[in-house]
Image (spheres, rainbow, N blue to C red):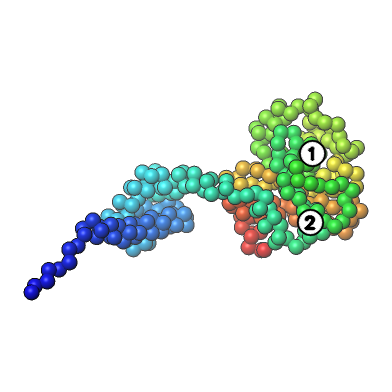
């Protein structure tokens, strides 16, 4: 008796082959993106084929589809660079990151800040809002708590965030919040005029950090720096506070640099990249 071979379900056979056909193409596309990102100049199609050891016809087909989908862009020299659609994907990922969580996780790596009160604030109009705080055991004379609001122009974090604005944005902020609407200074050291604020912002930009020299509370100093997201946009400020009685134990510039280092670490966790951010990450 002759036994017939089993029937093959062509539909299932085709279905089973799909992953085998599609996965290599996806892997090749990712390899192309990695190559383009790492290249010092936009590579040509021939460069991609040679460096990845792929058939030219395969590379041309992949590049054409990736350009069509916005994953790559073709330059005037016929090379390829990363496309703007990737920014949409990056934004979708980074916006989901919890700023407060990233702040606390960054802070865990800074043992040199254990003796200070460290805060995270957002700029809302004329005020900064405290969204995270780690108080030190040292008595500051003023307590920080989540949800607290203070006038931005008197705080180190507020002025640090204002200093991160470009000139046009800062002028717009001044137009929206003229001096006539400013609150009364909280101490004799509080900023009272636009001229003083503009000079303060210029000094912050030059040295890289802001200083609250007892503007919020007598006997309390704070050093602040701005936090940036993946796009380079200022999103928050970090502050490092200590009593004036403890100030003599430290170099003022060093305290400011500690605030800057923490701000850069948080920025790095949010996806921001520059030479200083990478250097801080490599040192920790």
Query: Along the line of sight, which residue is nearer the eye, 113 or 138?
Result: 138
> Compared with residue 19, is residue 144 higher up or lower down, i.e. above or below?
above
| Residue 158 on image: x %, y % | 75, 41
Q: Residue furthest top?
A: 180
Quarter of the image where the C terminus is located? bottom right
Q: Is residue 44 left or right of residue 188?
A: left
Q: Residue at image x 67%, y 50%? A: 100
Q: Residue at image x 34%, y 63%? A: 53
Q: Which mark is residue 254?
A: 2
Q: Residues within 10 Å of mark 1 (few under 14, many from 20)?
A: some
| Residue 185 on image: x %, y % | 86, 34
Query: Along the line of sight, which residue is nearer the eye, 128 or 202?
Result: 128
Callout 2 secondary element: helix
Task: Determine which quarter of the picture holds residue 246.
Answer: bottom right
* Res 73 seen here: no
Q: Residue furthest left?
A: 1
Q: Nearer the viewer, mark 2 or mark 1?
A: 1
| Residue 90 on image: x %, y % | 52, 48
| Residue 279 on image: x %, y % | 64, 59
Q: Is residue 77 left or right of residue 55?
A: right
* Res 25 seen here: yes
Give the residue number, with chain letter if any, for mark 1: 150
Q: Which mark is residue 66?
A: none
Query: Along the line of sight, which residue is nearer the eye, 241 or 108?
Result: 108
Q: Is residue 83 left or right of residue 204?
A: left
Q: Residue furthest front?
A: 1
């Amino acid at each position: 008796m002759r036994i017939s071979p089993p029937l093959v379900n062509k539909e299932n056979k085709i279905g089973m082959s799909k992953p085998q056909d599609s996965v290599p193409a996806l892997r090749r596309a990712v390899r192309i993106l990695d190559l383009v990102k790492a290249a010092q100049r936009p590579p040509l199609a021939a460069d991609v084929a040679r460096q990845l050891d792929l058939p030219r016809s395969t590379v041309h087909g992949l590049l054409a589809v990736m350009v069509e989908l916005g994953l790559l862009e073709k330059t005037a020299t016929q090379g390829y660079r990363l496309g703007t659609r990737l920014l949409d994907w990056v934004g979708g990922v980074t916006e989901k990151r919890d700023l407060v969580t990233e702040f606390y996780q960054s802070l865990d790596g800074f043992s040199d800040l254990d003796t200070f009160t460290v805060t995270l604030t957002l700029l809302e109009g004329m005020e900064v809002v405290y969204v995270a705080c780690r108080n030190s055991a040292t008595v500051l004379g003023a307590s920080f708590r989540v949800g607290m609001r203070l006038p931005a122009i008197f705080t180190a974090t507020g002025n640090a965030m204002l200093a991160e604005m470009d000139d046009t944005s800062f002028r717009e902020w001044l137009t929206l919040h003229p001096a006539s609407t400013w609150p009364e200074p909280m101490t004799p050291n509080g900023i009272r005029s636009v001229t003083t604020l503009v000079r303060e912002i210029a000094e912050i930009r030059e040295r890289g950090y802001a200083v609250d020299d007892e503007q919020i509370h007598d006997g309390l100093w704070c050093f602040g720096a701005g936090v940036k997201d993946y796009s380079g946009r200022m999103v928050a400020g970090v502050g490092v506070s200590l009593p004036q009685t403890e100030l003599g134990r430290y170099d003022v510039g060093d305290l400011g640099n500690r605030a800057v280092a923490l701000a850069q670490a948080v920025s790095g966790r949010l996806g921001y990249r520059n030479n200083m951010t990478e250097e801080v990450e490599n040192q920790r």
